[in-house]
Image (tube, rainbow, N blue to C red):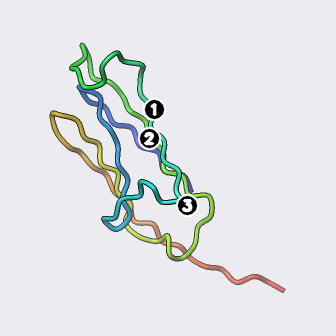
């Protein structure tokens, strides 16, 4: 499962991912990436808003992975978030 989010901000926003309110940083089963433009100082205000693209990747999905996934974008000006409910339906193997 791959979730992608784009956040525009000035200064550049940084992204954090959560499942059911718990941070996903450092969770072995999750890979989190962030990509923004090359900037000398990411904390400085730019001439125009800049985009941060983030991904949350979970290679194998299990019923325990179900929940509310939230991405929070934050910079020194403010915070924005988006969320989605993920349901995992387990299927039976046919013999």
Left or right? Give the position of 79 relative to 66.
left
Q: Nearer the viewer, mark 2 or mark 3?
A: 3
At horizontal 31% and vertical 51% (from top left) the residue drawn is 82
Work out whether mark 1 precedes mark 3 in sequence or the reverse, and give the earlier one.
3
User: Which of the labelled discs sits on residue 35, or is there none?
Assistant: 1
Left or right? Give the position of 55 relative to 41.
right
Q: Nearer the viewer, mark 1 or mark 3?
A: 3
Q: Secondary structure at mark 1?
A: strand
Work out whether mark 1 precedes mark 2 in sequence or the reverse, and give the earlier one.
1
How far apart are labels 1 and 3 at the CA level?
Answer: 20 Å
Picture layout, residue 49 above or below residue 3 = above
- Direction right: furthest residue: 95
In the rendered image, residue 40, in percent from the top left (x then y), is placed at: 34, 15
Q: Which residue is mark 2?
A: 54
Q: Secondary structure at mark 2?
A: strand
How far apart are labels 1 and 2 at the CA level?
Answer: 6 Å
Residues packed near mark 1 inside 10 Å, few (<14), some (14 to 19) or many (20 plus): few
In the rendered image, residue 46, in percent from the top left (x then y), is placed at: 25, 17
Q: Secondary structure at mark 3?
A: loop
At horizontal 23% and vertical 26% (from top left) the residue drawn is 10
In the rendered image, residue 34, in percent from the top left (x then y), is placed at: 44, 37
Q: How many marks?
A: 3
In the rendered image, residue 68, in percent from the top left (x then y), is placed at: 37, 66
- The image quarter containing residue 15 is top left
Query: Which of 6/27 is in front?
Result: 27
How far apart are labels 2 and 3 at the CA level?
Answer: 17 Å
- Name the image quarter holding the N terminus: bottom right
- Direction left: furthest residue: 77
Q: Which residue is mark 3?
A: 29
Contact flag, marks 1 and 2 (Cβ < 8 Å): yes
């Amino acid at each position: 499962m791959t979730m992608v989010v784009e956040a525009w901000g000035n200064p550049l926003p940084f992204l954090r991912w959560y499942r059911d309110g718990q941070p996903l940083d450092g969770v072995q089963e999750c890979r989190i990436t962030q990509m923004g433009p090359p900037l000398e100082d990411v904390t400085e205000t730019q001439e125009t808003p800049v985009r941060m693209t983030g991904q949350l990747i979970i290679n194998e999905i299990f019923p325990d992975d179900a929940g509310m996934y939230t991405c929070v974008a934050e910079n020194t000006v403010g915070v924005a978030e988006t969320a989605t409910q993920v349901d995992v339906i387990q299927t039976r193997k046919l013999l």
